[in-house]
Amino acid sequence: MAVYTEVSEAAAQALLDHLHLGPLQALSPIEAGIENTNYFVTACGGRWVLTLFERLSHAELPFYLGLMRHLAQQGLPVPAPCADAAGHLVHTVAGKPAALVQRLGGRDVVAPDAAHCHAAGAMAALLHMHAVDFALAQPNARGADWREATATAVQPWLTPAQAALLQAEVTHQRLLLASAEAAALPQGPVHADMFRDNVLFESGAISGVIDFYFAGVDHWLFDLAVCLNDWCVDMTSGRLNEALAQALTAGYAEARARLGQPVTGLEWRLLPSMRRLAALRFWLSRLADWHMPREASLLRPKDPAQLERVLRQCVEQPWHPQEGAWA
Amino acid sequence: MAVYTEVSEAAAQALLDHLHLGPLQALSPIEAGIENTNYFVTACGGRWVLTLFERLSHAELPFYLGLMRHLAQQGLPVPAPCADAAGHLVHTVAGKPAALVQRLGGRDVVAPDAAHCHAAGAMAALLHMHAVDFALAQPNARGADWREATATAVQPWLTPAQAALLQAEVTHQRLLLASAEAAALPQGPVHADMFRDNVLFESGAISGVIDFYFAGVDHWLFDLAVCLNDWCVDMTSGRLNEALAQALTAGYAEARARLGQPVTGLEWRLLPSMRRLAALRFWLSRLADWHMPREASLLRPKDPAQLERVLRQCVEQPWHPQEGAWA
């Protein structure tokens, strides 16, 4: 999130007037996150999160906002975007494309236990299943092409060991994604950034999944791998916690099975490889944000070293879930 | 709300499976309310309120649920109903028509202060404005015809003084609603039951307006009168608290003005009369629920005496807001 563009009270009020949501009561910047500018907005008409899209174009936004609306309409705890009288979900604030979305209750969990991980896995599966019939399609913007280009761009800042790791992983990604096996993996719209800080809990249940602005069509398995690499990893060592990983994977597998789309043997087989792609994607964005930061009034880039450790662990300690545990 | 129909875990699970919302985690009956059966439902996919409609027919439900969806889509804190894969909002549970709607955060306020009343008034105006372009129309089911019929039905239980009051108020209603002035009042879909227990607050702002199952097309002024008679009245004496009433009315008037539809002189003039209709409507339903209760496993009818006192006060102490205060 971060704050790249300062939003004045007058600008927020103008949006609220456009949406007929009453006089502004409070406007406060949100420091967390890295990609867009975010504010909490409170007015007579409710409480929302205002997002100004700093790099995404108007053309890309209907996919993200439409997907959020699609999922919210089906009852999932996804923030519904506010439509104006003409039905548009994309508005303009301070000259930037912007959205105002429902502010959901609950808090993120910094140190998840097995129950949290199980719930997160199940939620990932529910999102996959409910997104299948969403009408729009847009590739994952941090997909293979972006990863290749970014791997080149960050070269100047790498140690020889890092450059070697990156080279090996780009090659691995190329081979994997060119394979017939990868082509046979089920795919659809995925969140692609379902880290712990994007999932809110209330009274032990998930009350919100937020920040869909990295969503895109990709392999479902990629999304599962992203979750495993954040929810179930010790960020100091980069090591996977097997109990948490088993819980998250079980939650995912059980929900997929319940919804009539059991996880396939192929998906299980490719999970270790996909975890490498997922770790690569976030190591690359951390490197880019760290070494090539953008101008912002509030921004705290995250140390890329964490994700480098996660990636090394994915390569050196491939993990296979115990499928029998929930079959 | 109350519980007229017991919902088994299996029945709740069947609905969750139909909606692809994952295995049930918790199901608990909600005692509050009087009209429908309500449960809190928690599952992998989120937290909702399940409502079984005990007296409303399938044909009436698209109006209520569609209105909730319409308002939620525009960003108002109204619970969005869950749609199934075919887009339907009305489902079937235990043989009854049912809906599963988002469970919003926050709590109702038992003893509201002026700020709460101001917010409630503003929210009523926002609901009116945003409902104007809702595609469906359905009259207030507790409108003039229902009130006349119910006034007859409750006669056997009334004291002579109560019967006289009721007769006078039915006559007053008839004259008012037949007048050219009433015909000139602005109308549209209104909540029609925006009591304190149907409005949730979080951190001082409204986080939810719930229970739209008495909504219907009626005069906006009727809705304002319903709010005044609950939020701003001392239930022991039935007397209006002028400071609270002024705050609620100011909130309403300011929001109407801001949205380009200032409250008209005619509306202000008819407010005292409309408060009598609103008090009559709730006195009648309290009388009917008290003397002609339905079979229920959990039900606490509310004492009609409170609303009788409110009605007498509306008749004996008509109140006019100080319009100048916010003009």
Image (cartoon, coloured by chain):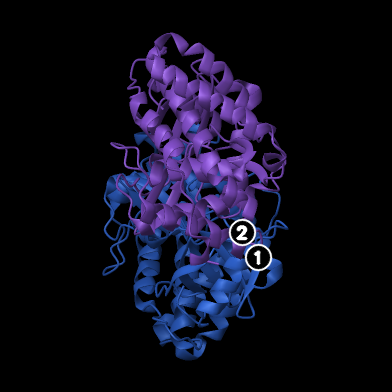
Chain colours: A blue, B purple
Q: How far, Cα to Cα, is label 2 from label 1?
A: 8 Å
Task: Indicate left or right for B216 with A136 as reference.
Answer: left
In this view, the residue in front, B95 or B245, is B245
| Chain letter of the residue beneath label 1 in the structure image | A
Above or below, B216 against A243 in this view is above
Q: Are marks 2 and 1 in contact (CB under 8 Å)?
A: yes
Above or below, A154 against B302 in this view is below
Q: Residue furthest bottom?
A: A156
On residue A128, which mark appears? none
Task: Indicate left or right for B159 with A257 as reference.
Answer: left
Above or below, A279 against A295 in this view is above
2 or 1: mark nearer the eye: 1
* Callout 2: SS: helix
Above or below, A135 against A171 in this view is above
Callout 1, which amino acid?
A: Val
On residue A90, which mark appears? 1
In this view, the residue in front, B188 or B320, is B320
Mark 2 is surrounded, within 10 Å at the Cα level, by few (under 14), some (14 to 19) or many (20 or more) other residues, namely many
- Which residue shows up at 60% across the image and 77% down it? A55
* Callout 1: SS: loop
In this view, the residue in front, A60 or B122, is B122
Q: Residue furthest top?
A: B156
Callout 2, which amino acid?
A: Leu
Specify the quadrant of the image occupied by residue B222: top right
Residue identified by numbered label 2: A65
* Of pointers 2 and 1, the one earlier in the residue sequence: 2
Quadrant of the snapshot with the N terminus of chain B: top left
In this view, the residue in front, B75 or A199, is B75
Specify the quadrant of the image occupied by residue B147: top right
- Which residue shows up at 32% across the image and 22% down it? B300
